Image (spheres, rainbow, N blue to C red):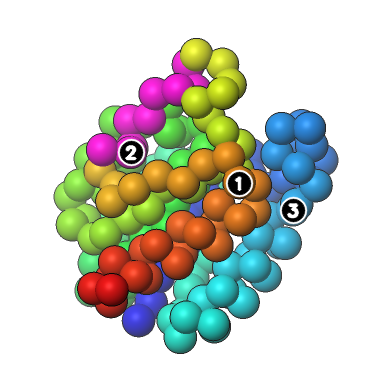
Amino acid sequence: MRILVINGPNLQLLGRREPAVYGPVTLADLEVLVRRTAADLGVEVEFRQSNHEGDLVDWIGQAPGTFAGILINPAAFTHTSVALRDALTGAGLPAVEVHLSNVHAREEFRRHSWTAPACAGVICGFGADSYELGLRALVSRLKGV
């Protein structure tokens, strides 16, 4: 079973961008954590990041037939992108949205997610653990556990 892990804009800056909000973890650290968790679960992951909305839309659209599900941190696009929501809905794959910070405890504009309704669930506020928890939840759903 293969899982596509998508990371949105500015996540390449993790570790130095607002560490009080996002913690010290880097995108490379997250990839190590996700790959280790995937190995424990007996699944494969493909880890991607882009600052360009169209890249994310394209990757989601190409996922059916190659991936069983999507773990996505849409980052800022969470709060702005109907295109990502439509792509997730159109792909028809189970998806879990994750965020390092608790978006509900932050600025008002971050409290609305356009992408969440197209996902099986959302995990936020647990730092790097959000990715591990999200992957575990997604795999559990895919395996029907």
Residue 129, image x, y percentages: 61, 56
Residues 129 and 25: in front is: 129
- When the figure is inspected, residue 26 is found, relative to residue 31, above or below; the finding is above
Residue depicted at 78% across the width and 32% down the height: 20
Find disc 1 in the rendering and name its residue. 126
- Under tag 1, what secondary structure? loop
Q: Which tag is nearer the camera, tag 2 or tag 1?
A: 1
Left-right relation of 4 to 39:
left
Q: Check disc 3 and report its element: helix, strand or loop.
A: loop
| Range of magenta residues | 109-117
Disc ID at residue 26: 3
**Mark 1 packing: few (<14 Cα in 10 Å), some, or many (20+)?**
some
Which is in the foreground here, disc 3 or disc 1?
1
The spot of residue 15 in percent (x, y) is 79, 46
Pointer 2 and pointer 1: residues touching (CB < 8 Å)?
no
The answer, for residue 58, to whether it is visible in the render is no
Residue that mark 2 sits on: 116
